[in-house]
Amino acid sequence: MRLRFVGSNSGGGGCPALYETDRDTVVVQGWKIDSSDQAYADVRDLADNEELLEVPRELLERFTPRPRPAASDLVTGDAFDALFTGFAHTARRLETRTHYDIENERESFDQFLSGADVDLGWFAPWLDTMRAQTAEGKTVSRVRVVPPELTEYLRYELHLAESNTAVGEDIRYLDREIANGLCLPDRDFWLFDSYTLAVLHFADAGQLLGAEITDPAVVVEHARWLDAAFHHAQPYQQFVKEHPPR
């Protein structure tokens, strides 16, 4: 069973916390209850393979995982692309995966791995869009949460980041251990104008399935996560000196 961190109200590390699993269940990390506590007399039908944990009500209210959206409810195609031209001021992203499988970039990824020159023709539409947005004074930024040893794909992304930053994107890198200490979620999302939250959903192999436009009530929490991530992350220019992609 694999866990995906959803959230914690502990303020930085430790319990309590909630996780989603890869078998459509939820795992709770909470405080152990002493076996002599009255709770064990009050509980109903506690099986031998079950245990009692205590968590704050606030944890469940703020972070209880929701069912995965149906494919038909995800924003894709032109509607997804429109998110990157329709925002007024800021587009900020948190990236947490160590690999993405994007069809358009597979050939250039193979070129990077082989040591050949990397053809970025496929990248031009995104770069043109970002150049146009930043030229209007808009901010496009992202924090990439990375492990101590970069995966081949993360090194490839680092190679591409030179082009991202050249058109005005602000890309920063955050060590996974620091991210865990900040209780950042294990999910990718874009936050537009601190108002529109687009949580990204992926297949297990890393293909983007689409974006879930979520309830505005959770925007503040995601904005707080982004504020913390950007505060602790290294700018691209500093990170790439310490981690050359090739």
Image (spheres, grey):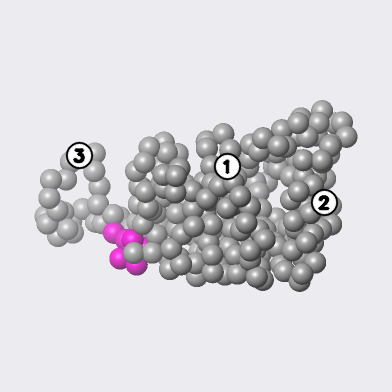
Q: Which residue is mark 2?
A: 163
Looking at the image, the residue that sits furthest to the top is 114
Q: Point out the tag, 3 or 1, that comes first from the N-terminus.
A: 3
Judging depth in this view, the residue of 59 and 125 nearest the camera is 125
Residue 57 colored in magenta in the image = yes
Q: Residue at x 28, y 54 (%)?
A: 53
Give coordinates of residue 7: x percent, y percent.
Answer: 45, 58
Q: Residues within 10 Å of mark 1 (few under 14, many from 20)?
A: some
Judging depth in this view, the residue of 46 and 93 nearest the camera is 93
Q: Which quarter of the figure is the C terminus placed in? A: top right
Q: Point out the tag, 1 or 2, that comes first from the N-terminus.
A: 2
Q: Is residue 225 left or right of residue 33?
A: right
Give coordinates of residue 190: x percent, y percent.
Answer: 59, 58
Q: Residue at x 57, y 42 (%)?
A: 208
Task: State whether residue 193 appears in this view.
Answer: yes
Q: Residue at x 63, y 40 (%)?
A: 100
- Element marked by disc 2: helix
Q: Point out the tag, 3 or 2, that comes first from the N-terminus.
A: 3
From the viewer's perspective, is residue 89 above or below residue 142?
below
Quadrant of res 173: bottom right
Query: What amino acid type should be assigned to the residue bearing mark 3?
Result: Asp
Q: Residues within 10 Å of mark 2 (few under 14, many from 20)?
A: some
Q: Which residues are magenta?
A: 54-60
C-alpha distance separating marks 1 and 2: 22 Å
Q: Which residue is mark 3?
A: 48
Task: State whether residue 239 appears in this view.
Answer: no
Query: What amino acid type should be assigned to the residue bearing mark 1?
Result: Leu
Q: Is residue 45 left or right of residue 63?
A: left
Q: Which residue is mark 1?
A: 208
Q: Residues within 10 Å of mark 3 (few under 14, many from 20)?
A: few
